[in-house]
Image (cartoon, rainbow, N blue to C red):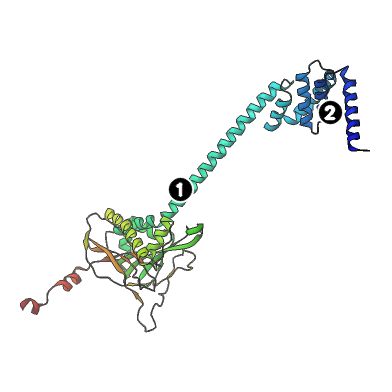
Amino acid sequence: MSAVFLKRVWALGLAVALGGCAAYASRSDYAAYRRYRLASSEMDELRAMRDYLEAHPNGRFEPEIRADYEAFEGDYYEDARSTQAGLRAYLEVYPRGRFQEEAARRLAALSTVRSRRVNDDAERRTREQAERDAALAERRQWADRAVAYWSRVLLGVSNWDVPMEQVVADSADFDQAFVADPRPRCSATECVKFYALSYGITAVGQTRLERRIELALRLRLDEGRLVGAELLMPNRGFSRWYELENNTPVLDADPESRQATIEWALARIIPILRETVPTAAAVDVASEPIDALGVQPASLADSQAEEVEAEEVDVADEEGEMALVLPLVLQALEHENVRVVVFAAADEDEGDAFDGFQIRVIHEEVENAEGAAQPDEADG
C-alpha cells in the first residue's frame, strides 16, 4: 500500500470524525477538547481545562471538563499551598478558584518572608565580608601596632641603668607589657619576648606565597640593671613588614626593591618615635653591632613561649669570636639619657639580618671622655 494512499485514508478518517462531531461541537470547541484529552502532563491538562472553560463556557464538552476541573482543585491546592512555586501554579490554572483569595494571601506572606530572608542573607554576607576585611586589615597592621606599642612602652620608661625591680616599680605600663603573653625568656644578660605571624601574599598570576614575619623584643641587662632594649625583625624584617601590609612580594636580592622597603619602614617608624618623644634631637652616630639572640623560643613554630631561665646560646663562629651583625644606621635620636637608633641589615649580611631599632643608655662620662681633647694635644 503506497504512502499516498495511507495519507488519503488518514485524511478521510479525520474528516469523518470531525464531521461526526460537528453536529454537536464546533471545530474550535473540539480542538480545545482534544488538547485536554491529549495533554501529556498534569499542568498541561489543567491549563487545557482552564483555557477550554474560558473560551467555551457553553461548549459541547463544558460539563465534563468543568466536573474534572472542580473535582481536582481541592487536592491540587493542598499540594500547592506550602510553596511559592506551588501557589503561583495554582493561581495560574485556577485564577478564579475557590482558594484564590487564600492562595494570594499566602503567596504574599511567603514572598515577604522570602524577601526578608534574602535581605537577611545579603546583610549577613555583607557583614561577614566586612568582618573578614576588618580582620585582614587588622592582621596586616600587626607590625605597625607592635612598633607603635613598644615604642611607647620603652620610651615611657623613666629610669634606665637601674635594677629591673626598680624599672618595674616605676612603670606600670612596662610591667604589664613585659609580663603579658608571650612570656619572656631570660638569661643573665637578656630577656626576650618572641612574636611571629604567618601570612600570605598574592603574586603574579594569583599565586599565593606563604611568608612569616618574626619580631623579638630584647631587654639588655648588666648585672640586673636595664641598660638597653631592641626591637628586632630578623630575616630583613622591614621587607616582611612591607609585604604583610601591602600584600606585595619583596625581592631582597634586588637592591632597589630592598631600598624602597627600608625607606618605607623608616617613614613609618620615625613619626611614631617623634610622637612618643617629641623633644628628641637627631644625632649622627656610628653603627654598632647587633649580636645574635642569646636565647631562643622553646619552639620556633610557637611564639607563645613560657618564661624559663634559659642558658645562653653559643653564637661563636668557627674562629671562636662572637658572630656580630653590623647594621646600617638609618636615623638616630637622643632623648634625655637614652639614644634611639633605627637600623637595617646590610646587603651582605648573611646572619640573622636584623632590621629594627635599639635603645641604649648614654653614659655621660664615656661620651665626654671620647670627645675631650688630650692634654698634650690641647697644649700643643
Question: Where is residue 145 shown, x and y percent of the image?
Answer: 38, 55
- Looking at the image, which is closer to me, 174 or 356? 356
Question: Where is residue 199 shown, x and y percent of the image?
Answer: 47, 59
- CA separation in Å, label 1 and label 2: 64 Å
Tell me the residue at 19%/68% (across/down). 364
Give the farthest residue toward the right.
1
Q: Are marks 1 and 2 in contact (CB under 8 Å)?
A: no
- Looking at the image, which is closer to me, 254 or 12? 12
171 sits to left or right of 368: right
Seen in the picture, residue 102 relative to 177 is either above or below; the reply is above
Q: Residues within 10 Å of mark 1 (few under 14, many from 20)?
A: few
**Which structural element holds mark 1?**
helix
190 sits to left or right of 35: left
Q: How many marks?
A: 2
Tell me the residue at 77%/30% (across/down). 44
> From this viewpoint, is residue 128 visible?
yes
Tell me the residue at 84%/20% (across/down). 61
Q: Split into 4 quadrants, where in the image is the C terminus?
A: bottom left
* Residue 173 in which image quadrant: bottom left
Amino acid, disc 1: Ala
Residue carrying label 1: 134
Which of pointers 1 and 2 lies earlier in the amino acid sequence? 2
